[in-house]
Image (cartoon, rainbow, N blue to C red):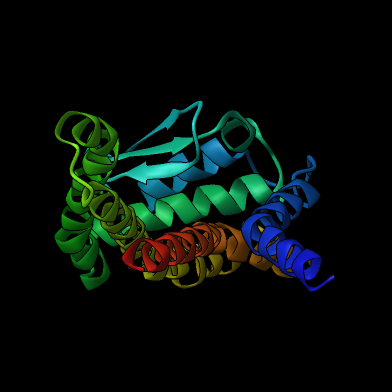
Amino acid sequence: MLFVLVIVLVLLLIYGPHLWIRHVMARHGGTLDELPGTGGELARHLIERFDLGDVEVEPTSGGDHYDSAARKVRLSPDIMNGRSLTAVAVAAHEVGHAIQYHRQERITHLRQRYSPLAMTIQKIAIGILLAAPLLAAVFHVPQIALVTVLAGILAMLASALIQMIILPMEWDASFNKALPILIEGEYISQSQYAAARSVLRAAALTYVAAALVDMLRLGRWLAILRVAIR
């Protein structure tokens, strides 16, 4: 019985945050004709309003994000063309990131400084994981198993570090940028504040969900390491 409860708890930790985020986005994704425009239209308007220079809005088949290198706000079809609270809140959130970089806020410097290092460490660790079985087969070195486990732990630590670096930026984009913009600009009505807050909270916590998964994976690798050392 205890084993079943542990499995259920682990599954809730892994899938619960993602399911909650999807639920919030879908719940507030219905078309609202009273909104002044679509997510894409709002994004373009805000770029002009805050004088963000050559930042552009373009559609993407992937997730909604701001590409700081290309200076592009990329929005999925539902957000780009949607006239819903989810669409305008997510669009404002992504423009919030563009504002962060345009103002060269300190929070962006942390990401620019540490994210490339963490991603490099992650790539090296993944390379070791992929090469380890071949090295073990060729050289018959028993320590390869330990190296593989350590590489797995390193990859998960690097991934978790990336998520922790990103989280403050996400929270700032939602609650110091997007929400005040939507309220003060009267893009949404007072009755819609709570719903917009929920969507923006979900947008910010997307990376918390990813970090939780990474920490669970890290725990698994640590358990494997404990067995390998014995």
Expressed as whole percent of the image width and height from the top left, the position of residue 141 reads 18, 44
Give the camera-side residue of 33 and 142.
142
- Residue 53 figure quarter: top left
Q: Give 75 or 210, whichever is nearer the viewer.
A: 210
User: Quarter of the image holding residue 73?
Assistant: top left
User: Residue drawn at (70%, 58%), measured in percent from left and top?
Assistant: 11
In terms of image quadrants, where is residue 101? bottom left
Residue 178 can be seen, yes or no: yes
Quadrant holding the C terminus? bottom left
Q: Is residue 25 left or right of residue 65?
A: right
Q: Is residue 179 above or below residue 89?
A: below
Percent of width and height locating residue 211: 47, 62
Say which residue appears at 58% left-offset and 41% top-offset.
Answer: 39
Q: Quadrant of the image for the N terminus?
A: bottom right
Task: Give the tally of numbered discs.
Answer: 0
Residue 62: where, in percent of width, then height?
Answer: 49, 31
- Please state the horizontal and vertical placement of residue 84, each as a whole percent of the image: 71, 45
Q: Is residue 78 above or below residue 91?
A: above
* Left or right placement of residue 147 versus residue 24 in this view: left
In this view, the residue in front, 60 or 224, is 224
Q: Is residue 38 left or right of residue 59?
A: right
The residue that appears at 22% across and 42% down in the rendered structure is 128
